[in-house]
Image (tube, rainbow, N blue to C red):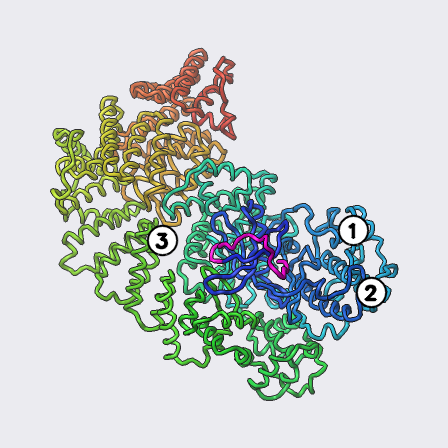
Amino acid sequence: MRYVPTPTPTEPPLRMLGHYLLEAPLGAGGQGQVFRGVHRPTGLPVALKRVAEPSPRERYRLKHEFRVCAELRHPNLVAMYELVEEGPECYFAMELVEGAPLYEHVRRSLPHGVPLDEGGYARLATSLAQLLDCLAFLHESGHVHGDVKPTNVVVRPDGRLALLDFGLALGLSDRYATRVEDPVRGTLAYMAPELPWGAPLRPACDVYSAGALALELARGAPPFSGSIVAMTRDKRAFDVEGERSLAGAPGWARAFIAGALEPEPAVRRSARQLWRDLPERARAGVVQRRGGGLSVLSGRESEVATLEGLLARTLAGGSAYGLVLGPSGAGKTALLTNVCAALAGTGRAWILRSLCRPHATVLFPCLDELVDGLSLLLPSARAAGMTLELEPNAVASLLQVFPVLAADAGLGELGAEGELPVAPNELRRSAVHCLRRILRAVAATKPLVILLDDLHWADSDGARMLRDLLADPESHHVCVLAAARGAALAARADLRTALTGVQSPEVTNLRVKLAPLPPSAIRAIATSCSGITDDAVLDAIAAEAQGNPYVAVQLAHLACLRPEALHRAGPVSADAELAAAREPITDAARSGAEAPSSAATPTLDPAMLIRARLGLLSEDAQRLLAVASAAFGPLPLPVLSHAAGLTRPIEAVRALMNARHLVAEVRLEPSMVLQPHHARVADAVLAGVDDDGRRRLHVQIADAIVAEGIDAPVTLVRHLRAAGRLREASARALSAAQQAMARADPDRAAELFELALRFPLDGVDPSTVEAQYAEALLESGDGLRAGEAFERAIEALPPGDRSGTRGVALSCQAADAYLRIGRFERGIAHLEATLRAVGVPPAGGGRRAAVVRTGYQLKAWALRPLRREPSPHDAISNAQRLRLDALLTAGLGLGWPATVLSSVYLAQHLYESVEVGDATHLAAALAAEGAMLSFPGNPALRAIGRRCIERARQLARELDDPALRAFAAQNEGAIEYTAGRWGAAVEVLEEALGIYRQHCRGPSWELSSARYMCAWSHAMLGDLDAVEQGRAELIEDASMRGDVLSTAPLRVGPQNMSWLVRADPRRAREEARRAVVEWPDQGYSTVHFQAMMAQVQVSLYLGEPTDAQARLDAARDDVRRSGLRIVQPLRVFHDHLLGSTAVAKAIHAPPARVRRRALARARTVARRLEREGLAWASALAASMRAGVASVEGDWPATARALREAERCFTVAEMRVYAAAARSRLDALGSQSTPGPRLDAYAADTPAMARCLLPMRAPA
């Protein structure tokens, strides 16, 4: 900020920046431009700082400057109003300081180069007293300004000094975040001599700058000039005794300049020490504001030890999660930051901090600062060996939400290649997944500590994002320390869910509740922040603070007002406090010099002190503060002023802002937001308001929210409830929920529907509301709670309607919700009831099921489904649609737990869809039939299946239905998958997944199946990193929702091999075991089958063929009864494991009889694989023949079979298997084709070769 008395004619025309009108430039520099502006909604004059088209690094610096100043409160610092980040724009609004530059204020009309006169030195002393107290406060609070000079200091007309421009400010000792060393910036003439040569920025640097500033004001000329080398030489040689301009200076000035300009920083005196040496008259009007009062941790030894234990666990390789709870002012922030201060200095961990601020207009305020810190940390993490494997689309989503991360060149380039999803919740989820992977990669280089402070200010969207980020089952070497107000957390279900932490035996979860501090600790804090040493005053502060350190700090400052008013036996009167509030503050209370005898008992009544300060305010300001005190959280000024009945509130606002510590968070988005500085302020303001009066305040606030058109439905409903208007509260919540659904924001809609259901529903069917709530939950991804809500919707129906069309439809939806997430027991119960209600007979099982399925398929094809044109919409009854819905739900929902039954219902659905002619169901039925026809592996049926897909795609295009387009693409991918065309399968399945992500919400069988087949295909291609990445994303997203259908399949089958190539068989075995444990007990299913195959792979990898054979034998009957071998990929892979196990057993079995039997079994399996007619099956057969030949010692035959296997694997695009064949040929000394060997993929090559191509090594 710069003082410009009169705008010049060359200024740019007035223009808008957000909701601010830019009036005139105040200054510009390397750190940005500053403008005089007006906040249009309120008329408040402000100063605006912005950087035109900021780079990611400039964006970070601007936000960092705001954050530093917003955390600090001192009479000589400028108030911060609002940080705004909207698209490319990034700026902040702050208090507009009207006044004169310090040079002009001190020197008045003295000519340049003329030494300062007596009056000037008096003004200099007064200014330095304020400046040094402000700098000491900064340093004690853990910050350095970095650019102290005369043009950065303005003196207001009342004489109060303001220190401006924190663009170079830096936190001390790396207390919160990893620092990035920037080139030295600042103004050379005022810069400490050690800085240009690589010394770190420290408090002593600010002290030197203050000395240079004083020298310029005394001299009337710049303190130093010339080149860097010349200035450094002059600074080190400076001698105050030889300075002619100081010959007539008072002794205090000469001593101050000499002490501040000491060239050695270790000897240079501190700002607080120099302040004490200023003339007493200059210091008399300054109250020392000590920074860091709340950083005194006396009385918190137990809590410190607990948190240090969590950090130690993280440093030892574990993961930990700690939540610090306490009321406002209990010292949560001080506890977190001080515990991490020592760790930050060791360099043993990365430390990221995020303080959630209500006066920051950014997308996710609870994570914004953390991500900004991450943008600076990434280069160091890369240098420490961090590797990132990210999808371009995910990075694009991340950069859309957090553009500052584009500062990392790798992320910026990758994000430019990606595409953004359409649905807002998919954008958020994709960004969260990407951010998780980055944080996980950072933690892989060294432990990561994340501090999340003041999370009670997080908005609903931020809470959901935080929940997704913290619920990371793959998190290792991470310690999350969070802090929130306990009362606020109790009222926020979304935050409680977010702060639950990772529920895992491997993660330590602790809650630390801050109890009131003992009197001795309160006394120490009061002395630290104010210098008070009088025992009687300290006892009074300790008694009244009730263990709250923040209250102790405020009382200590208030006690410095007039000590004689506090040292009396009786209570302090409001009149006395009102008088005291108008008086300047002295040093008496600090030393106890004016205290009467120790027999006097001082008393402190904070409420009386607050009310006394309120008495200094206008009536309008008091009414405005009363409304703000009654509000449930920050509200914009138009609402507050409307509720208070004010037509011109800006003067009241100014009065409240100037009355320090009455209002705290001043936020200007979308218009000014006011809130009491502390709960005690609100309590004191409302102390004299009875219950009826409070209800009237809530009525006024609710009416004002409606009248002003503010989009704050949750706040509005809370005020309506407090006002006793319950029916209106319900109606408002319901209307807002429905609007949120129309905006495709199911997360917000679910929150509002839940709120509406807490109140009486006047004239609204509760069953309908429950069903709408369930649909919102389902679209937001919470299938379990959606199913429960559908059940409540059924219960809310009249008994006679529960078995009617509506009840059956709700039961079908409940079945669908549960089946989508693998809650089969509850889902199947609803499904069976639904099928009975619509007249669908049980499908049966075994051979009968196969007969029934074939019968429906024949009947369907007799109707020529590929030529069937859809019937008119009106020609189809609701009952017919409901029956088709039930059949499709059964066909798709039972695909994992009961594959045979699923095929029966899909065949029946095909037949009835063709018969009825419903366009949507016909498209879905043909798509599913295309995949079903391809499963057995018959080429002729597969060709017909492709025609079905083609017709399904055509119908989906005509209906313009993205879900149907995705489903058709998914089933085309299934055809390629069953044909062993892995590359084509990945391409088509990625198309389907892209449509699902862009246009569809909620969990689904379709999405899970598409991801599963895509992961299998990637595994067959050898793209094991893609398998791991896709699996991690899915497990991260689904584990939060208890969606086992999405997680279990990706832990098993060929995908499990991704852990083996990393030489982690223990993890591979454990994941397969977990898949079975988590899977509902509904009989032998695809998951059991694939888990068994994964375990066999692990046994082969470990060289344990007997265990592999035992697992295959144990599952033989279950596999036969399940009918799963009808699916060609499952059948081929199962045969491969049968043959590989036989070869491995022959290698390890000494008796000739056992060896012959094993080899015969392997030959039989090889012939079976040859008959499949697929390249990959032929390759596996050839590799099996090579294994047999190696056991028999026929090395030429072994080499021929391996070359055939390598050729077929290459044709089938199975790169890992082809590499294994080449490695085996190399071991034989036989010639093989060029290409990667197995060591390019696997960490343990011999073990991986045993798993993929078992054979005996040559002697």
Sequence-wise, the earlier of marks 1 and 2 is 1
Instruction: For the N terminus, give its image quadrant.
Output: bottom right
Q: Residue 840: x percent and y percent?
A: 14, 43
In the depicted view, which residue is nearer to us: 127 or 34? 34
Checking the image for residue 225, the label placed there is 1
Query: SS class of the residue under badge 1?
Result: loop
Residue 814 falls within the magenta-colored stretch: no
Q: Residue 1038: x percent and y percent?
A: 38, 46
Sequence-wise, the earlier of marks 1 and 3 is 1
Residue range corresponding to the magenta coloring: 1-20
Q: Residue 1158: x percent and y percent?
A: 36, 22
Crowd tier of the residue under label 3, counting other residues whose Cα lies within 10 Å: few below 14, some 14–19, many 20 or above: many
Rendered position, 735 above or below 648 = above
- Name which quarter of the figure residue 647 lies in: bottom left
In the depicted view, which residue is nearer to us: 70 or 242? 242
Crowd tier of the residue under label 2, counting other residues whose Cα lies within 10 Å: few below 14, some 14–19, many 20 or above: some
Distance of label 1 from label 2 (alpha carbons): 21 Å
Distance of label 1 from label 3 (alpha carbons): 61 Å
Q: Residue under circle 2?
A: 254
Tell which tag, 3 or 2, sits nearer the viewer.
2
Q: Residue under circle 3?
A: 747
> Can the viewer see residue 1029?
no
